[in-house]
Image: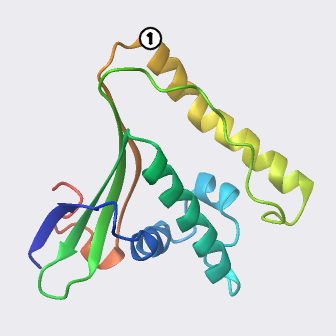
Amino acid sequence: MPFELSTVSKDEGLRDIVAMLFKAYNHTSAFVNAIYPRTLTPDGIEGLDTVTERLQWLRDNDPSTRWFKETDTSTGAIVSASQWNVYDKEKPPEMMLDGAPPNWFSSDADNKYAVEMIAAFIGPRYKRYREADAPIMCLNIMGTAIEALHRGAASM
């Protein structure tokens, strides 16, 4: 299985990448399950589109965002992907996500739990940013498809 590493261009959609990432997480990430509760359920196609739109908006509007993908050159399938934030001149502004779009969560309690999970996960990152000098690189998202595990895709 030979792999090719490449950047994801601004013109390239993220939907296939996001779908691969969520399948790779396989419902095992407490963070992902809390903030993206409907991604791989029967109505998950709607959730997947919403997640993709949010990530595309961030990519298109945040100059620090850089997406990379690994492609299996024998099949053309995306087998690994990552999203990095590179702050080469200035530290990032601190902002906490406030949950998700309306009706994303089935209850207010689920929304509150997601907001608290985001704060617990992202808060220490911002503390580190405050303490560090630029440039700063942060691996924000990464996943490898099950069929590519232990074959060198992620280490590439």
Position of 113 with respect to 7 (left or right) is right
Colouring style: rainbow
Location of residue 100 by image quarter: bottom right
Location of residue 30 by image quarter: bottom right
117, above or below 127, in the image: below
Position of 97 with respect to 70 (left or right) is right
- Which element carries disc 1, helix, strand or loop? helix
Q: Pinpoint residue 101: horizontal percent, then vertical percent.
A: 75, 59
Which quarter shows the N terminus? bottom left
Position of 155 with respect to 58 (left or right) is left
The answer to whether residue 59 of the structure is visible from this angle is yes
Q: Pinpoint residue 120: horizontal percent, then vertical percent.
A: 65, 34
86, above or below 124, in the image: below
Residue at (8, 75) in percent of width and height: 2
Position of 65 with respect to 95 (left or right) is left
Q: Residue furthest left?
A: 2
139, above or below 14, in the image: above
Q: Residue furthest right?
A: 108
Q: Pinpoint residue 74: horizontal percent, then vertical percent.
A: 12, 86
Picture mark count: 1
Residue at (59, 74) in percent of width and height: 49
Q: Pinpoint residue 141: horizontal percent, then vertical percent.
A: 42, 52
The answer to whether residue 152 of the structure is visible from this angle is no
91, above or below 72, in the image: above
Location of residue 39 by image quarter: bottom right
Which quarter shows the C terminus? bottom left
Look at label 1 and name its amino acid.
Answer: Glu
- Mark 1 neighbour class, 10 Å CA radius: few under 14, some 14 to 19, many 20 or more: few
Please tell me which residue lies in front, 153 or 46: 46
Q: Read off the residue under disc 1.
A: 131
